[in-house]
Amino acid sequence: MGELLNLIKKRRSIRNFRNDKIPRDDLSELIEAAIWAPSGGNIQSWRFIVVDDDILLEKIDAFSPGLSGNPPALIILCYDKNLAYQKGGKFGRDILSRMDISMAAQNIMLLAAEKDLASCPVKSFNRGALIELLKLPDKIEPELLISVGHSFVEPPPPKRDKLEKISYFNHWGEEDNE
């Protein structure tokens, strides 16, 4: 099995972190990985805010039910609605920009796994509170949080469906391996 596939299988969503701070160089490299993700129409409307200030982290935690485990850092993935619309119209703003965020998030989490950092994507947060706290301009839309830190444990992989059950070649078919 290839090195990349092993890394993909190693990555887990972790929600409990040690207190160790993450060096800013490492956090910057995670953002570097994000900007090399595919971008629909090459719009690149993504914007990233790294939060490693303990007071800000506590405030964000207070209105983010999906966030837990006191991560020492958060990467907030946003997109510039105006830029996305200018370059890709309604489709660029409403669809492509969110797809781009998803692909950038995966790059962040895979590089984090390679660096033996734990991560977890979080969608359940109070958008309005986050906008106010971080003083985001109207054109910037927060889409996803990724918590980053060192895990206490390396959990085993969750069960996955077999390829034969969920994939087909050339046309839709029924599972015939039973």
Image (tube, grey):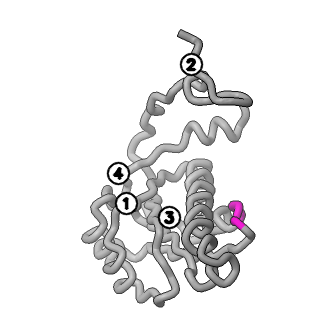
Measured Cα–Cα span from mark 1 to mark 3: 9 Å
| Above or below, comparing residue 82 to residue 15 in the picture | below
Q: Whole-percent x and y of residue 4?
A: 69, 41
Q: Whole-percent x and y of residue 95?
A: 57, 66
> Viewer-nearest of labels 2 and 3?
2
116 sits to left or right of 168: left
Q: Which three-letter amino acid code belongs to the residue tagged 1?
A: Asn
Numbered circles on residues, count:
4
| Above or below, comparing residue 22 to residue 50 in the picture | above
Label 2 with label 1: CB-CB less than 8 Å: no
* Residue name at image x 50 percent, y 29 percent: 160
Disc 4: CA contacts within 10 A as few (<14), some (14-19) or many (>=20): many
Q: Which three-letter amino acid code belongs to the residue tagged 4?
A: Asn
Residue denoted by label 1: 19
Residue denoted by label 3: 22
**Where is the N terminus found, in terms of image quarters?**
top right
Residue denoted by label 4: 16
Q: Which three-letter amino acid code belongs to the residue tagged 2?
A: Glu
Q: Which three-letter amino acid code belongs to the residue tagged 3?
A: Ile
Residue 135 is tagged as: none
* Residue name at image x 46 percent, y 28 percent: 159
Residues 70 and 176: in front is: 176
Label 1 with label 3: CB-CB less than 8 Å: no
122 sits to left or right of 48: left
Residue denoted by label 2: 175
Which sits earlier in the primary sequence, circle 4 or circle 2? 4
Describe the element under mark 1 as helix, strand or loop: loop
